């Protein structure tokens, strides 16, 4: 084969790989755990989510949600991050991000966070007065109570 023949083949292979990657990420998230039966149903409207740990990373949001999810800085008063959970801290403001998702995308986040098994989804008031879902570890002492 000549170089000129390899170029279209390489482009075709790259296109097939990109389409396959898009299908894997956007349509069939086989890499996410199954939704736990104890997970609450999502609301029937778009919602805000407050991310303070891995969900602050745009790459994580892209892989989990299946699309680019723009986020804006947000704050949660009265809480501080403790490992992968939150702890009461009345005089503290926790920095994070706020982003909007559809009910179907919230289910994907629930699968990622293992809602119902490891985390619960609580609605909380952000510093700007908007409400957002916040993922909290299940158990009295946080991460120490849940070990897999």
Image (tube, rainbow, N blue to C red):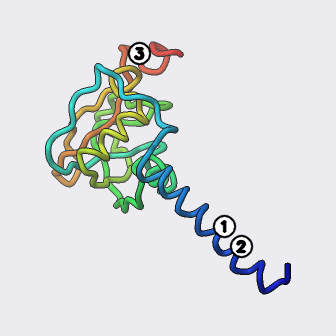
The spot of residue 123 in percent (x, y) is 21, 36
Say which of 61 and 27 sits in front: 27
Disc on res. 10: 2
Along the viewing direction, whichever of 81 and 47 lies nearer the viewer: 47
**Residue located farthest toward the bottom when viewing the structure as drawn:** 4
The answer to whether residue 135 is left or right of residue 30 is: left
Residue 124 relative to residue 137: left or right: left
CB contact under 8 Å: marks 1 and 3: no
Find out whether the residues at labels 2 and 1 contact each other: C-beta distance under 8 Å: yes
Checking the image for residue 141, the label placed there is: 3
Q: In which quarter of the image is residue 138?
A: top left
Of the residues under marks 2 and 3, which one precedes in the sequence? 2
Task: Using residue 107 as the reference point, say whether residue 118 is left or right of it.
Answer: right
**x 41%, y 44%: residue:** 52
Q: Dot 2: within a 10 Å radius of its alpha carbon, few (fewer than 14), some, or many (20 or more) residues?
A: few
Alpha carbon distance from label 2 to label 1: 5 Å
- Residue at (41%, 22%) from the top-left corner? 118
Binning the other alpha carbons within 10 Å of mark 1 as few (below 14), some (14 to 19) or many (20 upward) gives: few
Q: Give the labeled residue for mark 1.
A: 13
Label 1 – label 3 distance at C-alpha: 50 Å
- Kindly indicate the quadrant of the structure image that contains residue 137: top left
Which sits earlier in the primary sequence, circle 1 or circle 3? 1
- Label 2 element class: helix
- Residue at 36% across, 53% down: 97
């Amino acid at each position: 084969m000549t170089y000129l023949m390899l170029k279209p083949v390489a482009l075709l292979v790259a296109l097939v790989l990109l389409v396959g990657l898009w299908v894997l990420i956007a349509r069939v998230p086989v890499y996410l755990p199954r939704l736990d039966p104890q997970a609450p149903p999502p609301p029937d409207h778009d919602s805000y989510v407050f991310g303070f740990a891995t969900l602050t990373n745009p790459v994580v949001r892209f892989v989990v949600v299946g699309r680019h999810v723009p986020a804006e800085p947000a704050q949660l008063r009265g809480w501080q991050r403790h490992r992968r959970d939150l702890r009461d801290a009345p005089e503290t403001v926790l920095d994070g991000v706020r982003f909007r998702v559809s009910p179907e995308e919230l289910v994907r986040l629930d699968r990622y966070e293992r809602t119902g098994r490891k985390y619960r989804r609580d609605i909380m008031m952000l510093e700007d007065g908007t409400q957002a879902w916040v993922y909290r570890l299940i158990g009295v002492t946080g991460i120490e109570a849940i070990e897999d």
